[in-house]
Image (cartoon, coloured by chain):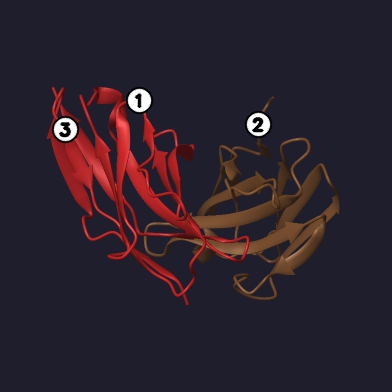
Amino acid sequence: DAGVIQSPRHEVTEMGQEVTLRCKPISGHNSLFWYRQTMMRGLELLIYFNNNVPIDDSGMPEDRFSAKMPNASFSTLKIQPSEPRDSAVYFCASSLIGQGVNEQFFGPGTRLTVL
Amino acid sequence: AQTVTQSQPEMSVQEAETVTLSCTYDTSESDYYLFWYKQPPSRQMILVIRQEAYKQQNATENRFSVNFQKAAKSFSLKISDSQLGDAAMYFCAYAGNTDKLIFGTGTRLQVFP
């Protein structure tokens, strides 16, 4: 199994530009999570999907952030327009909910730098 | 709401020695899971060990073991025979009735030769 795949691994952009982060969950998993990690705020859950449906987006910081999961094997997190304070490492994780243990498997993360 | 607290921002240990990382949590739920994740400099979040709250027996994975005290809401991680590769950030996490993981703020572990 390839694990959770994220792209790009690194992204540098200028303030005001649109940024799209991509995630491919582990095949067979039914839940997908987007996290943001910063030194100041630690690991924050932004949004999660179950069976491709957004369940909880209360962690999405503002309307500039949006996430989609058009099918079971792909999700995007979009920031438009980006701001320097969005600089962080963004993680995607997937799990198989309903099988007892809510273990989440993380991707390698995308380091985003907004200049 | 559930919370997870890691009161040790940094810890250090000498190679081959044993170190214990602390974690406490607060919840009103009776069924839940607890996890320790390791994040090395590569940033990859790696599951180290997990514990089901309904199990009294402490989980072990090779050199890693936990001391789970349900009444005290404590979930510490013991690393035996520490190795240089154990140097990383360690996060304690809680999963209850929702699907979400709640993370502590992490403990940075340094391992000295």
Numbered marks: total: 3
Q: Amino acid at mark 2?
A: Gly
Check chain identity for marks 1 and 3: say if they share one.
yes
Closer mark to the observer between disc 1 and disc 3: 1
Distance CA(mark 2)–CA(mark 1): 23 Å
Q: Secondary structure at mark 3?
A: loop
What amino acid is found at the position of numbered circle 1 in the picture?
Answer: Asn
Residue B62: mark: 1
1 or 3: tag closer to the N-terminus: 3
Horizontal relation, residue B44 to residue B26: left or right: right
Tell which tag, 2 or 1, sits nearer the viewer. 1
Q: Position of residue A94 (x, y in %)?
A: 66, 46
Instruction: Tell me the kind of residue under disc 3.
Output: Thr
Residue found at x 74% / y 59% = A49
- Is residue A115 visible in the rendered image? The answer is no
| Residue under pointer 3 | B18
Dot label at residue B54: none
Give me the chain that's brown. A
Q: Position of residue A113 (x, y in %)?
A: 53, 51
Which of the 4 image quarters holds residue A60?
bottom right
Q: Chain of mark 2?
A: A
The residue at 70%/46% (across/down) is A96
Residues flagged by tags 2 and 3 on a common chain: no
Between marks 2 and 3, how big is the CA–CA gap?
31 Å
**Which mark's residue is nearer the viewer, 2 or 3?**
3
Q: CA distance from mark 1 to mark 3?
A: 13 Å
Pointer 1 indicates a residue of which chain?
B
* Residue at disc 1, secondary structure: loop
Q: Residues within 10 Å of mark 2 (few under 14, many from 20)?
A: some
Q: Judge the density around disc 3: few (<14), some (14-19), many (≥20) Cα neighbours within 10 Å.
A: some
- Subunit ID for the residue under disc 3: B
The label shown at residue A3 is 2
